[in-house]
Structure formats: C-alpha cells, structure tokens
Amino acid sequence: MATRKNKAKDIETIIHTEDSRANIPTAEYQSVMASDEKSPIQVAYERRNRDLDPQLVWRGKDEQDWSDLVVQAPPLYIQEKVHPKVLIDDLKQLSQNQEQDDKPQFNLFADFNGINDEAAKTEFYQHEANWTNRIILGDSLQVMASLAEREGLRGKVQCIYMDPPYGIKFNSNFQWSTTSRDVKDGKAEHITREPEQVKAFRDTWRDGIHSYLTYLRDRLTVARDLLTESGSIFVQIGDENVHRVRALMDEIFGEDNCISLISFRKTGSTSSALLDANNDFILWYAHKKQLTKFRPLFFLKKIAGTGASEYKSLILKNLQERPLTKQEINNTSNIPTTGKVFTLTSVVSDGTASTPQTIKLFSKTYQPGKNEHWKTTIAGMKRLYQANRLSPVTAKRMYRRFFDDYPIYSLNNNWQDVRGALGKTYVVQTTEIIAQRCILMTTDPGDLVLDPTCGSGTTAYVAEQWGRRWITMDTSRVALALARARVMGARYPYYTLADSKEGQIKEAELSRKEPSLARTYGNIRQGFVYERVPHITLKSIANNAEIDVIWEEYQEALEPLRQELNQALGASFEEWEIPREPGDPWPEKATRQFESLQNADTEKKKLSALKKLNSLLGRKYTLETLPNTPYDLWTDEKAIKFHASWWENRIARQEEIDASIAAKADHEYLYDKPYVENSKVRVAGPFTVESLSPHRVLGVDENDDPFDPQTPSPDQPASQEAFVDMILENLRTSGVQQAHKEDKIDFRTLVPWPGYYICAEGRYYEGNQETGAEKRAAIFIGPEFGSVSREDLVAAARETGDAGFDVLISCAFNYDAQSAELNKLGRVLILKARMNADLHMADDLKNTGKGNLFVIFGEPDIDLLDTDEGQIQVRINGVDVFHPNTGEVRSDGPEGIACWFIDTDYNEESFFVRHAYFLGANDPYKALKTTLKAEINPEAWDSLHSDTSRPFDKPKSGRIAVKVINHLGDEAMKVFRVE
C-alpha cells in the first residue's frame, strides 16, 4: 500500500492593511533631505506637578525641575527592509525546482511601502505608507520623542513593555557579543564598547542611583506621552529598586492610575544570610485607569487543584450521586466521562430581606438565617429546585455548583507559575509568557505595542505572534542583531481570523448559528476566533423561564408514573425520594460501608469491610454473593416497569433543562487560546531595521544637547570641551594602526586646523622612514556618541581635497554601513580609523595597556562568481574585525560573521533583504525547519548557513548590495555593479 503524502503547509503572514505609518527616509535618501528635516527637533515635556505630593527626591532633581525636560528628536532612517515570507518562499521554490522568474516575493517588495508616486517617496513625513513593524537602533529617549513629534504617534500606543536595568550595575545588563552570554561585573574586558551603550552607561550609572532615577523618569515621561487614553505601561523591575520605581511612577502617571504590582518567580533565587529573594516584579500603570482596556486571562481549573479543591462529589448521567473516589481525585481520567463533578455551596447572602423568605422544598421549610436573604427570589429558588440545583441539606450548603459551570479561574497578580526563559540568547532575556500576559491583557489584535528596551526581542516576538503591531528599540547593536535574527526565523501558529471564511464557519459552529454570508477581508483588527468556556451562574438559572415550560411538559408524564409506582409498591414516594435502583436502599451507614468495600484495593481490606457491612445489616454476605448495588431489589415486575419509565423521563427532563441552561449561559473568551489552522504556518510580517543617523558631526552632551567639537560653547562641561584635544593628544602619541603593523602611521607633527570638518593637520613620512616622502593628512573626528555617516565622509573628503591634503584620516567610534565602500573620493584616499572605546571611557575603565587606540577597520572580502546558467553567486571570504574587548584588529574568516544579507536587485533607494545567511552557531530557522520539512528539503535549509549564496539572476538595476554583520553587531555594506 502506498504511503500517504502529507499535504504541504501554506506559508502565511499577517499584514496590517488597516494601519499606516509615516513615510520616513531610508539611509540612501539622507542626502536629498531638506536641511530642516535632518536637524533634530527640540521637544519639551512638562516636569511633574509640584502639587502631586508626596514625591521621591534625589540629588539633582530640584535643578531638573526648574525647567521642562527638553529632548532632541532627530529623524529616523530605514537601514533595511525585511519580509521574512520572501526568504521562506525563495527556499520553498528552490526546493521545488521552480523557474526563477516565477517569484511572487518580488511583488511583495515592490509594494512594501505602498507609495507609487516617485515624487511622494522623497516627500518625507507628508504621506502615509504601509504599516511595517520596526526595530530601531538608538537611545529610547530620542527615538520615542521622534516617534511622537515627527511621526504623529503621540497617543497611539496601546501598550508599552519596559524592562530597564534592574539596578546600577553596568556589566550584567549588557551583552558584548552574539556568541556569549557570560558577562561578569567588574571584568574590564567584558564591558561592552558600543558608543550608544557607553552613553547609556555614563547617563545612567555615573552618579549611582541618582542618575538611574533620572534616566527612568525621563524615559517614562516621554513614554506616557505615547500612550492612548486606554493604554497601559508595564515596567519589569527587581526587588532592589521596585519601591523607588513605584514612587517614581506614582509621580509621573498618578498614584490613582496604578493598577497592580505583579510578582513572578526569578530564573534563579538570590541566596542570602537572611531571606532568599525569589521574586521580580512588574509595575502596571494606566494612562487613565477608568478607561483602561482590559481582557481578562484565565487558568483552567483542575479537579482537586487550584480553584477547584472543594469539588469532591459526582453525579452520573443516570442522576445517581456519590463522592469521588481517591483514585478519581488522584487521576481524573478515572472519572466517568458522562459524570459531572460538583460541590455544594451557600445559596444565601448577607443582609436583611425586604420580602418573605420562607420556602418549602423537599417537604421541608427553609429560610435564611438572621440578617440573611436568598441569593434570588422565591420564584428563582423554585427554578433552582426544578433544575436539580438544590440538595436537601442546610441553606448554607444547598446549591449544587458543577465544575463545568465555570471551569476557569482568573489570573491574579502572583505569577508563581512563571519560570525563567528557556534557550536564552541574551544575558537578560525576558520570559515570553510574562510579556505575553501583559500584552494579551491590555491589547487587541492590530493594536500597537512598544518596547524601549529591546534586548533579545522578546516583546517583538510575542507581539508578532499575537497579531499586534510593534516597535522595539535598543542602544545595543548586539541586541538588535539577535532580535532581527529571532524575528526573521520565527515560526508561529496560524490562528483562525474572525474576518475569514474559515472564521465565519468556526464561529457559527461554536454559537450554533448559520454561518455569516458577509464578505471577508482578512482584517486582523477583527481579531481571532477564540476558545470559550461557559459561565453559568445561579442568577442565570434562576431567571431562565424556559425551565418552567420544560418542567410542566414532563410533569404530565412523570406525575402519573409516580402514582402508579406508589400504588404498585404500596409506598408514598415523593419525587426526590424515588430510589435510583428498583429496590429499597440500605441504611445510610450500610451504604457508606458498601462504598468503602468497593474502594478497597486489597483482599484483606475487602474482607474487613465486608465483615463490618454484615454486622450493620445482620446478614452473611460473601464477596461472591454481595449484590452490585446497596439495595434490596424489588420483585414486582409492574413496579420495576413503572420505575424504569419514570427514570427515563426524569433523565430526559434533566438533559433538556441542562441544554437550556447551557444555551442561555454567558461565555468567557480565552484570549490566549485562539483556534489554530494546522494546514498553515505563519512567519513574521514585514519589518524595517532603522537607526538614529547622526546629523553632521555633532556630539551630544550629558543633557542630550548637541555640540560641535570644533566650536565648543563656554557653558559646556569641561569634559566635552576637552574631547577633541584628548583625541588629538592620543593620536599624536599612538598613531594609527593599519591591518599590517609595519604600515602603522606615526605622526611627525599634529597641529590644529581651522576647518569645518577637518580639525587637525598631521604630517608623516611615507613608509615611516625619514627618507620617505612627507605626506599631509587631514584629521576628521566623528561624534563622541554615534556613528559617522557616508554623507559626513564625503563632505570631509571634499574639504580635504580643497585644502590640498594627501589623505583623509577619519577617526570615529563607529561608521554606518553605507560608508564601508567609501575608500576614495577622486584623488583623496580615505582611511577610516576605528577609535578604541577606552578613549571615552577612560574615567570608568582601567588602562588595558594596549596601544592600538586608532585602527583602520577593514572592509568585507567579497567575490562575485558567474554560474554556467548565466546567473551569479556571492561568496564572502571574511572581514577585518576590530575586537572591542582587546583593542585588536584581526582578520576573521567567515566564522567571524554572524549573518550576511544580499539585495539581489539594489535600486539605491532601499536595501531589501532578499537573501539572508546565518553563519553563527545559533540557528534562527530551527523551528521552521521542523514544521516545513515536507515543503523545503534539507539542502535548501543548509544553504542558509553558507558563505556562498544561492545563484540568482543578474539584477535589472545593474547593482547588488551585500551587508555583513559580525558578532559584535558591526555592519559593513558594499554595492557592486553587475553588467
């Protein structure tokens, strides 16, 4: 017999068609921007209202409160456009050997922005583009201000999840490489050397807790401005500072807007000589508490577990009642599937009634206690009786509540079920379930979630899974490299959309109605089709008038049968007294002893129980002669017939009443349990990688105010005034190291130069010999914090040529990817030297003794290969890496590369990631490989880990672009012409 071939899975993604974002420039369009668009906007945020007391006070706060918080809001630039579905579709087509020109994924890129007018593409901030999610490199303070002021996102964010540093230790909060999570406080070689992170270090921890609180207050103030009126913010924090941060958030958001302090279990407890610290915390605040969007989350109850420990009785389909056995409690699979577990609860409430409360049930008169009343009316109590929801015991324990009436219990603020993140890729990675709960409680599909502290990208990963839009940002290139790879390779279940044909059918099935015939559009804002559970309440049963109708209908058959039965037996059974079996039940003590005998698990225990039973009954049963039920069975055949007919109608009545109760019950939606379409798999939607590109060569001082290194103002801090002098002094003594040590440049003289970009003139001998020719070098110094752009290098090179210099030596802590290919402008040779971060961390780090303070950063070594089919391939041989931990340059092979991307048809407007390759140890596509093993063969998956690309057609644009990213997050991009 032939094996059945598995049906191929459809690969889908979520597109937010109903939402848009501002048209912002790409890095390629930076040069055509108007000067006012490039310049940062100053955004002022009002400080706290002094009338809102009490307040937390720290050193320097009073001076800060004298004026508004002023934040520089520079423009954001798109560095990459990524559509993960394109990458997977390409692999799928390769695996299926389809023709290369049959590629719908290029259409996806063609409509990436949704702006077809060529002129409109460069009219930045004036048009709306298609929504894409966003990963942004930069200080969250400036990024959030830019989003609010330039892009109109003020009041548009539904949820902010913030995971700031827990304390004032620097090292343990940042990771220096994608390959290592081993970070130790106090080890100088483990302190990350990335400029944006160093700025965070100096701003946040220089003055200990005082700077820490200022750091948080500024960012929380700007974050609050982004929230919708119904929005929420969650701040994850440790026990070291939770009390301070709560006081700070009371000040910013108002103590009336504090919703909850959530505690959850740490990954590992902190040992102490006193009490161990096992918990971290989440502070949940609302923008406006009374308007907060809230979607409750629930846990499913378990018999004898949390929320259901009192459910210990069982009623079978034949309406026979008994206690649950130990075996059934310990293993709920032993409970009969037709049985319903229940407990008895009170049917009275506190408070004196205004109407008579006496009621006759089960031939008894019941009334509430003093200062109590029934939870419903007298008519309602009768319906509860008719629905078999009352038991003939005391009013305090009279109402029969079934386990299935409400098989869930609400999530509270004690999340002890949460464990640490599994498979961590980042040193302070957040557990997914924590971010998931926060997002699901406060947002709907299509809402916008923002994370100012990206880390490994957990918030983005979770928001994408649940159909939320997202923006995440970080100062660390390492964090963004990990987050980018994580989202690109993510695999998600395909949840059934409410606005789809499948959703309409599923919803009709659940609601027992005809499917809707309305047209569907796949709009994610309509949400998913969720699992739901009944919420049957005492009130809903008491108010269900249909129970009266069903009762009366069946009474016409039941009452005559009861009378016939009594007549045949000469008995006077009331309805509730008719035994379940056709016989006279044993006394209560004997019945309980019979049940004990049935539950005995050894021969010895059974014989002991049998002896006690015979003693109670005065009989001589053996285990073989013992009846199956604790009854003395009747022998009158007419009575047995009436009895069977009566119970048949009684059970039918109960089933019909139960169906009526279920149909009229409310339901609770399980927002964390949407229905899944297993024939489909989902990958992440389109997203962009963006950055705050520096405006010219301006540095930023400790108050986030820009300054020009060539024209320091008198009121600048002394450390900033001395920055250029300090660089020149080190350059004068250390020189510039190139790839080969014998090519080191030692300056004979180095003197200031009154230029706009050029700040110094250096003279050296070619070949470093006094007999060699003397060369004049123009010295260009980049910003103290941030990267040098291609635009800055071009301007500096032009000034170099105009002044007659032989070579331009650019000194910067980092260069953007577009500047990597710029090595010469006309006759002017451009040497790009990477400055060792020790130069702007001298006060915080000990001197490592390394003399390589200025090192030329090499470019990627890339070959273009022609194939026999007329296509081309790209092979990457390696890249020179400036290693930030040792201050050395080393020529790495491909193993030094974390990932590399190709835009196989580069249009010089945007870098589209059309091919992606991951050479590091981590495999972002591991989950997708398992799911799509039938659709994509192993050879295609293996091609993702190669230093040689898959073949592709020559580009119509005549250009391709290759971007290389190493394990430290450094980027280099080269553009190639292809004839």
Image (cartoon, rainbow, N blue to C red):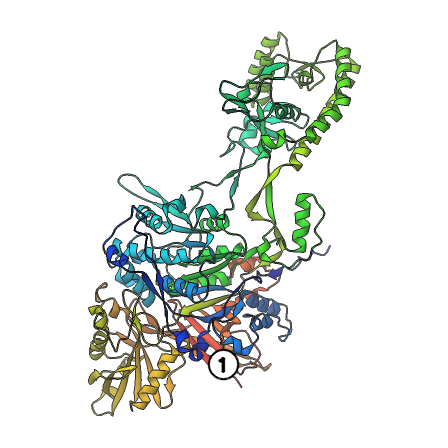
Is 31 left or right of 512, judged from the image as shown?
left
Image coordinates of residue 338 in percent, x first then y, are 66, 32
Camera-side residue of 193 and 68: 68
> Eyeballing the image, is 96 above or below 516?
below
Q: Residues within 10 Å of mark 1 (few under 14, many from 20)?
A: some
Camera-side residue of 398 and 706: 706
The amino acid type, in three-letter code, at marker 1 is Leu
- Answer yes or no: is residue 210 visible: yes
Is 850 left or right of 126, judged from the image as shown?
left
Q: How many marks?
A: 1
> Eyeballing the image, is 288 above or below 755?
above
Image coordinates of residue 729 in percent, x first then y, are 20, 77
- Answer yes or no: is residue 897 visible: no
Q: Which residue is mark 1?
A: 864
Image coordinates of residue 242 in percent, x first then y, are 33, 47
Which quadrant would residue 483 be assigned to in this image? bottom left
> Eyeballing the image, is 808 above or below 573?
below
Image quarter of the N terminus: bottom right
Quick one: SS at disc 1?
A: strand
Camera-side residue of 307 and 15: 15
Outermost right residue = 638
Image coordinates of residue 583 in percent, x first then y, are 70, 15
Which quadrant would residue 668 be assigned to in this image? top right
Which quadrant would residue 612 be assigned to in this image? top right
